[in-house]
Image (cartoon, coloured by chain):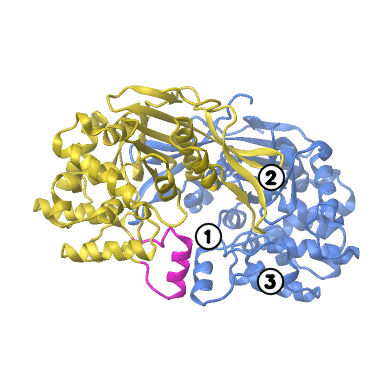
Chain colours: A blue, B yellow
Amino acid sequence: MSAPNPILVEVSRGDMVESYHRGAAAVVRANGQLVVAWGDVERAVYARSAIKPLQALALVETGAADRFRLGDEEIALACASHGGESAHIECVTRWLARVGLNPEDLECGPHLPLNEQAAAELLRAGALVSRLHNNCSGKHAGFLTTALHLGEPTRGYLNADHPVQRYWQQVLADMARADLTQAPVGVDGCGIPVRGLSLRETATAMARLADPTGLTATRAAAARAVVRAMIKAPFMVAGSGRFCTEVIRHAPVPLVVKTGAEGVFTAALPGKGLGIALKIDDGAARAAAVAIGAILISIGALDGAVRDRLADHLQPPVSNRTGLIIGHMRPAAAWLPHGISL
Amino acid sequence: MSAPNPILVEVSRGDMVESYHRGAAAVVRANGQLVVAWGDVERAVYARSAIKPLQALALVETGAADRFRLGDEEIALACASHGGESAHIECVTRWLARVGLNPEDLECGPHLPLNEQAAAELLRAGALVSRLHNNCSGKHAGFLTTALHLGEPTRGYLNADHPVQRYWQQVLADMARADLTQAPVGVDGCGIPVRGLSLRETATAMARLADPTGLTATRAAAARAVVRAMIKAPFMVAGSGRFCTEVIRHAPVPLVVKTGAEGVFTAALPGKGLGIALKIDDGAARAAAVAIGAILISIGALDGAVRDRLADHLQPPVSNRTGLIIGHMRPAAAWLPHGISL
């Protein structure tokens, strides 16, 4: 193992820092130029749900989205780790019905809605948890729709050798300019195969999503459609009070951010032509959000007014069971002392 | 900041380690001798709920437990981060009634039971979440009972200058042989004041709980009563399927282990006269359990049969939403390669 990654985020309680999170991050231009890196950005990481916007390219560039008249809400849901709130469930339900499928065709497992209120309401109503509530159900609806469009079987669409999985993995390899043939293989929370890429490669793919000028016309159009959908329908990307939704909605410049399990976060900034990818070593989601927020501030993507508005996301207070604020999560004092010059 | 703490726990997915956790740990004898240390064991940490067994000493040594005829179950609950299952709630309810108090006297906030099934049942039944469900409600019942016994007001028992808080903090200072006057101050999740102690000091206090021969007769009896209660009523310490309950119940030697928020774990081993304290830097509970398990194995406190039985706690599989095991949490390969010689 190389030198330890730097401390990116500190969690204070009262007089002292109680816990802290190390990690690595890369900010990259569409031509692959590394603008800035912290820690080891060459180690392979699974980007998990943070690359759903790249997975959604397959849905759009194959023509599946156009053929089934999917709008910004559906495309945003294909990029989402949604909260399982009623608007999310209704949209996925309508989408599946439109393409002639039903919730049982989703091969992601069921789980309680990520949104706590939605989960509590479901339990109070005595309703069953379904695959629609899986935060990835929009992505899976996207895979199913792509399979239908390509004339492939929908059943078994999770398998590594299914044409839909092979298709988006090729998209990922192209976008990241990465050789996936030797990349580590794993299985994601929702069942799809995942490959380990470096943060530099992952950020490169996000930068090309942001600035698709070097891509084929078809893929460039798909990239613009995916970014536009996330910006037009940010609620569908996550949900009530969630970091991704709030940052996309309130950022003063067009940008997308996307969380992934085990402490991954990505961003794509069309105006600046930049992609960002980071991973917290220990997998903590709480730290990944604070870290991507700090980088966005540092590169000038979030101004003062938005920083005030999003303060509870950017430097979240730590509250206890009695409702008292007893600490804060903050970017580490020794990290990012000044703005990044681009 | 001193050198980074070592990697104690790795979380794999498929072909590679996806996330990893650094931390520090101390194994100490009752005379304060450091048997072994990993990482920085002198940095102050809040031991959080991992020192509830030390807080419970106040309940016993003042005579409050005897006066109100508390049994092993109540004393174990005073040491607990319980799951809010019916047996826990019923026992705290009976206890409060016996001393003439009711749930509203608890000043910890309410939260849904830690036990997922208990939480779901509560929601399905349309019942209200109460302070009884707070995982610390047994500890708070202990504070209230101690206040009653000492003739102090029960109201405001959470405040730093309340005699009950001052009493147990003095117990902690004595047991840990620590000077708390300069120690960092914070507020715990349940509202009580907490002080930062080093892992060496925390482990010293746990070692003296395990081997109380150097304590006053009253405190030594209290220490034995607390350890006995946790061993006799391990379900009350945590609950169904929980690490603390299962390890205490199945260990081939008498021992207690106790989890604390933000990645802390302690253990006390009466037969060996040892105390253990560890903290995962990033606060991850999942890693703290694996790390304390690895140390217990390493010092010979868990034999082969128990290790098989507790395999899902000691090296927990990582499952996805489809039920597939896609990885494992394990002690880091480079840590603890051999047993510790005592």
Q: Does residue B286 show up magenta in the picture?
A: no
* B334 left or right, relative to B301: right
Instruction: Say whether disc 1 or disc 3 marks the residue closer to the N-terminus.
Output: 3
Boundaries of the magenta span:
B110-129
Q: Can residue B169 be seen in this view?
A: yes
Where does label 1 land, which residue?
Answer: A241
Front residue of A297 and A323: A323
Label 2, label 3: how far apart the Cα atoms are: 26 Å
- Residue found 81% across the figure and 70% down from its top: A69
Q: Which comes before the other along the chain, label 2 or label 3?
A: 2
Disc 2 designates what residue? A47
Q: Distance between the residues labelled 1 and 3?
A: 19 Å
Residue at 55 percent across and 30 percent down: it is A6
Disc 2 is attached to a residue of which chain? Answer: A
Task: Say what secondary structure mark 1 lies in.
Answer: loop
Q: What element carries label 3?
A: helix
Tell me the tag on residue A91: 3
Asked if the stretch drawn in magenta spans residue B118, the answer is: yes
